[in-house]
Amino acid sequence: MDVLDTLDSLSRSLEKSSKLAVIGNMAVDIIRGHIYDGTGFAPLAPATEAYRGTGKPLQDTGGLRDSITFKVDIDQHMVSVGTNKPYAAIQNNGGVIRAKKEWLWIPAAGVRQLQRRYGYSPTDVIRGLKASGYLVFRMGRTMVYKEKRRSRNEEGKLQYQVHVLYYLKKSVEIPARKFFDLSDREMGLLAQEADIDLEQL
């Protein structure tokens, strides 16, 4: 192959790469839009809503949405769109999460504030509460905490304020929330914008 043929081949390759990048950017925007819109998603479980407050599913921290990216393959024949979040697949497809050890620790209302103070893991939260003078113990399938000293209620009687920390479960079911699908209409928009035949890529 002579120099002109090589340059011509490179030019076509770069043009194709540019078109694939257009598709990748658009696909990322569409999928992120699915998460932002949240239409048709199963609502938050009551325990999840109590923990994180009201809001749309998949939009707690924005980490999942922001992790959606694209990459053009080095040989310029393919663009892939994906995420590096390990929980993305089960959030999209649904399924059951089972405890690897004895229990799953599901945070209760108010735990988010404790996590900000002591750390994210249950171990961090429990250690922090104990260091701050609270008693932490298990009641059935819940972990709870209370002050070591009793306080007086409105009637002046001494009482302990007991707060639920975690619900202990063997498994939880995650409903499917199909944010990572592209409809035929959306695929058509990608092809129209890039001015290419997607079946030939």
Image (tube, helix red, strand yellow):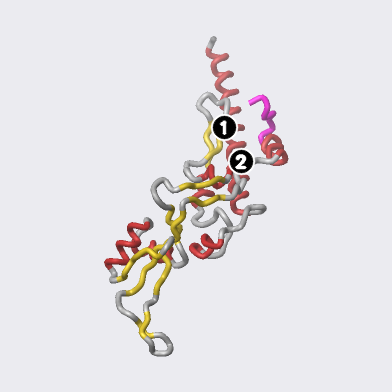
197 drawn magenta: yes
Q: Is 152 in front, or is 189?
A: 152
Instruction: Choose top left, top right, bottom left or bottom right for residue 131.
Output: bottom left
Pointer 1 residue: 79
Q: Position of residue 193 (x, y in %)?
A: 68, 37
- Quadrant position of the N terminus in the picture: top right
Disc with the residue nearer the chain's start (1 vs 2): 2
161 drawn magenta: no
Q: Residues within 10 Å of mark 1 (few under 14, many from 20)?
A: many
Image height check: is 58 above or below 6?
A: below
Q: Is residue 26 visible to us here?
A: no
Going by the numbered disc 1, the residue's amino acid type is Val
Q: Is 76 in front, or is 8?
A: 76
**Mark 1 and 2 residues: CB-CB less than 8 Å, in contact?**
yes
For the record, the magenta segment spans 194-201
Disc assigned to residue 27:
2
Image height check: is 182 above or below 151?
A: above
Left or right placement of residue 94 versus residue 39 in this view: left
Image height check: is 57 above or below 137?
A: above
Instruction: Identify the residue at horizontal 62%, vertical 54% (top origin).
Output: 42
